[in-house]
Image (cartoon, rainbow, N blue to C red):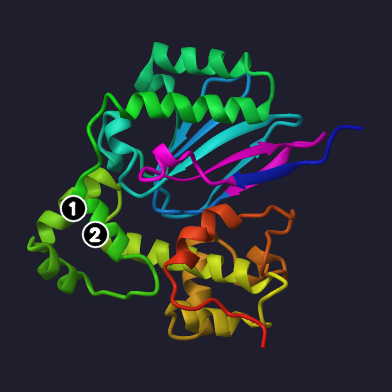
Amino acid sequence: MGEPQSYVERIPLRSLATRVRTVWVQRTGPEPYVQRHLPTGGVELHCRIGAIPRLVGPLTAALVEVLPADATIVGVRFWPGAATPLLGLPADELVDQAISLADLWRSEALRLGELLIDAPGPDAALDLLQRHLVSMQDERDRPDPLVAVAAQRLMPWQPVGISALTTELAISASQLRRRFLTAVGLGPKPLQRTLRFQGYLALAQAAGSPAARPLGVADLAADVGYADHAHLSRECHRLTGLTPTELLLGDVDRCGCGHDHAASYLPFLAGRRQVPRAG
């Protein structure tokens, strides 16, 4: 009998931290695995060992696919707007799409795939992938600095209206939207809604830790800025196709398959003034 499926997230190399939110290793078990990719606001690079790497663009709704049995995938999740200089095309051309990296990087994508095949194991493959991106970013332009600042201001816990943000950045709403579509693939408001939902999932992760006091879905929804449980439910269904209970399968700290997403949600929790604690 094969190994059970698993998904382990990690914090990226420090030299990638301004571009990359998290990296991971995923292994499917002896049966094909149904994967539901949720919107994160950023681009993802998926490298299945033995196959050509591919990109999953910024999502506005869940992307469901079936992964083959006994597969090993190493991946990178970029911050909103941070992948565009590496890709060489506007992010809005990738929205809601999964494409072969060969369509963008051509022979370089093939070389990367071969490099990962030769790695002695998944951890080594993930390290090679990160170091390859480090060498690439040293040769490419940096992400749009204004978009990077704006995206940080749109994170949960510090709600800001788009009009106030444009005033703060001394830019018109149309110019900000244009730069967001090029760099992020989404406008400022859709990104803010996506990041708020990611903040909710981060709170759900923290609420399930041993040190946390019990919190219900309604408490978490209010904490992240939703008007009420119904507001959260509408946004959850729009972004994932499921209700909060269906998505979390009744367990707020992990997805139904036991995947631990702590590394991915640490940046959201770090920006929060207070994380629920016992006592």
Could you say which disc has been placed on residue 150 in the image? 2
Q: Is residue 21 magenta?
A: yes
Query: Camera-side residue: 224 or 51?
Result: 224
Query: Camera-side residue: 74 or 212?
Result: 212
Q: Circle 1 — which element?
A: helix
Q: Circle 2 — which element?
A: helix
What amino acid type is highlighted by mark number 1?
Leu
Could you say which disc has been placed on residue 265 in the image? none
Q: Is residue 97 magenta?
A: no
Find residue 159 and report its horizontal and vertical position in percent.
32, 75
Look at 55% across and 61% down and name the residue there.
241
Q: Is residue 163 left or right of residue 260?
A: left
Query: Camera-side residue: 137 or 33?
Result: 137
The relative height of residue 270 versus residue 207 in the rendered view (above or below) is above
Image quarter in which the C terminus is found: bottom right
Magenta stretch, residue numbers: 10-36
Q: How many marks?
A: 2
Find residue 259 and report its horizontal and vertical position in percent.
69, 52
Could you say which disc has been placed on residue 146 in the image? 1
